[in-house]
Amino acid sequence: MQNCNGTLLFEQKPRISAFASVVGKKEAQGPLREDFDKIVYDSYFGQDTFEKAETEMMRTAVEIALEKGEMMREEIDLAFCGDLLNQCVASSFAMSGFGIPYIGIYGACSTMALGLMMSAVAVESGAALRAVCAASSHYCTAERQYRMPLEYGSQRPPTAQWTVTGSGACVIEADSDRSKDGFKQSNGEKDQRQTVFPNTQMPYIRAARPGMITDFAVTDQNNMGAAMAPADVK
């Protein structure tokens, strides 16, 4: 891996070998409806709180991704997951039953991109043959976290964005040639896990560029677009 003026260039070709998405009813009204793996029309997802619903969405997204990639959870070496809640509780509880070494990340709107980058770095470095990354958000939990609970009945200004209700998950793994070498175990033997590529058109992660903090002193908490746009352009 090379660092070219802040851009990470991956030489070992980390690959997105499986992915999944779970979304809510509003997201199903958009043009991407047919591309989602699961649509949930119940905002509670069968749970008794919105926060537990978000946890269930991520757990389901990760399970679907593993199923699509024909992988067992024991074949995943690391997990990089995050959400918008305090202490990343949605992703922490979502991943608690998988038995995968877990690294919680908090990047707000950049969480999925950050998870992909960190997974690619882990695979590129040889720290993992396979890593899973996932991100989630829920409109109702985000409103409670950052603005006002929905029960308060506050009016949204025209500039306010609508937080997605959904979760996405991806599996990143080493290219097929490298994976055949496996990991060297403490007893000197090698773990000969094979990569599974259900679709030869799955993309590689060639490069990633971490962003830099750019603050134009936007103070309107409802206008997140204006706050983030300068950093995106830079």
Image (spheres, helix red, strand yellow):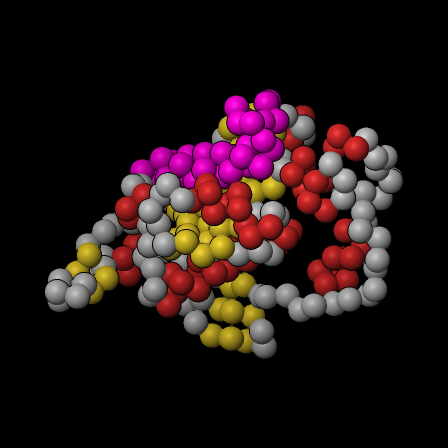
Query: Which quadrant: the C terminus?
Result: bottom right
Front in this rendered view, residue 69 or 186:
186
Q: Is residue 126 left or right of residue 60?
A: left
Judge left or right: residue 139 versus residue 216.
left
Which of the 4 image quarters holds residue 33?
Answer: top right
Can residue 212 be found in the magenta stretch?
A: no
**Which of these two is toward me, 92 or 196?**
92
Q: Residue at x 81, y 54 (%)?
A: 226
* Residue nearest the observer in this picture, 87 or 103: 87
Q: Provide residue 180's location: percent of width, then percent of height.
A: 23, 57
On screen, residue 196 versus residue 144, left or right, reads left
Mark count: 0
Residue 117 percent coordinates (x, y):
50, 60
Q: Position of residue 124 (x, y in %)?
A: 39, 65
Q: Is residue 15 visible?
A: no
Decide: is 127 above or below 79.
below
- Point out residue 102 in the picture as x, y percentages from the top left corner: 41, 54
Above/below status of 6 relative to 206: below
Q: Is residue 56 above or below residue 134?
A: above
The residue depicted at 61 percent of the width and 27 percent of the height is 43
Quarter-wise, where is residue 60 in the image? Answer: top left
At 25% from the left edge and 50% from the top edge, which residue is drawn? 194
- Which quadrant: the N terminus? bottom left
Bounds of the magenta span? 41-70
Residue 74 in sight here: yes
